[in-house]
Amino acid sequence: EAGVAQSPRYKIIEKRQSVAFWCNPISGHATLYWYQQILGQGPKLLIQFQNNGVVDDSQLPKDRFSAERLKGVDSTLKIQPAKLEDSAVYLCASSLGRGTYNEQFFGPGTRLTVL
Amino acid sequence: SQQGEEDPQALSIQEGENATMNCSYKTSINNLQWYRQNSGRGLVHLILIRSNEREKHSGRLRVTLDTSKKSSSLLITASRAADTASYFCATDYNTDKLIFGTGTRLQVFP
């Protein structure tokens, strides 16, 4: 079975620019997650979708970050404008359903460098 | 922050040796999970242990959970160079989302 796909794999931008990341989850997975992983730390959940609805976005910096999951499949995460502290790997994950007993499958991530 | 903490932060061993890493967390949980992250395969789920379980095995992995001490340990037996990776524990804190710890970087030398 195909895994979680993400693009681009790498992105370098200057501060105050905007950037967008794309994620295609495993087919049939209703729940989709975006995590931010800063170098040397564990992943931090930014937003969780159940189909095309937002379940949890309590950790999403909404003044600059936005995410959508149209039609309950693919998802995009956008940062506008970017700050230096946004440099991180952005991981997308999916699972069959909500609840932590559903195994999360992670994509390869997008490494963002903000200069 | 409710983020758990792993220790040690880094561990270096020779192939064939056992590796033990520990995770401490803050409040009650439904389950605790261990993940591995390396450059080749990204972040991969290893094992889940429920709060009413004390020990679980999967191949060369052994996980223990002590809810009275709010701690868990991951033992990798007969380590291989391919086990070189960062290992994270993740807890749910009775919610439907995971909080990841800070990770242990394991280096296995051939």
Image (cartoon, rainbow, N blue to C red):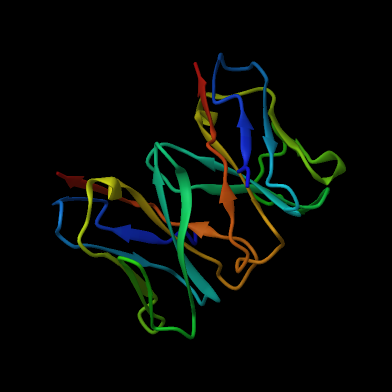
Residue B74 in the image: above or below residue A32: below
**Between B71 and B18, which is closer to the camera in this rendering?**
B18
Q: Is residue B10 left or right of residue B26?
A: left
Dividing the picture into quadrants, the one containing residue B41 is top left
Dividing the picture into quadrants, the one containing residue A6 is top right
**Between B62 and B12, which is closer to the camera in this rendering?**
B62
Going 54% across and 48% down the picture, which residue do you hit?
A44
Q: Is residue A9 left or right of residue B54?
A: right
Q: Is residue B60 left or right of residue A66?
A: left
User: How many circles with numbers are drawn on the protein?
Assistant: 0
Q: Position of residue B63 (x, y in %)?
A: 35, 72
Q: Position of residue B10 (x, y in %)?
A: 23, 49
Q: Residue furthest right?
A: A71
Residue A47 in the image: above or below residue A67: below
Q: Position of residue B85 (x, y in %)?
A: 32, 46
Q: Is residue A6 left or right of residue B10?
A: right
Residue A89 in the image: above or below residue A72: above
Q: Position of residue A99 (x, y in %)?
A: 66, 66
**Between B23 and B17, which is closer to the camera in this rendering?**
B17
Going 50% across and 47% down the picture, which residue do you hit?
A43
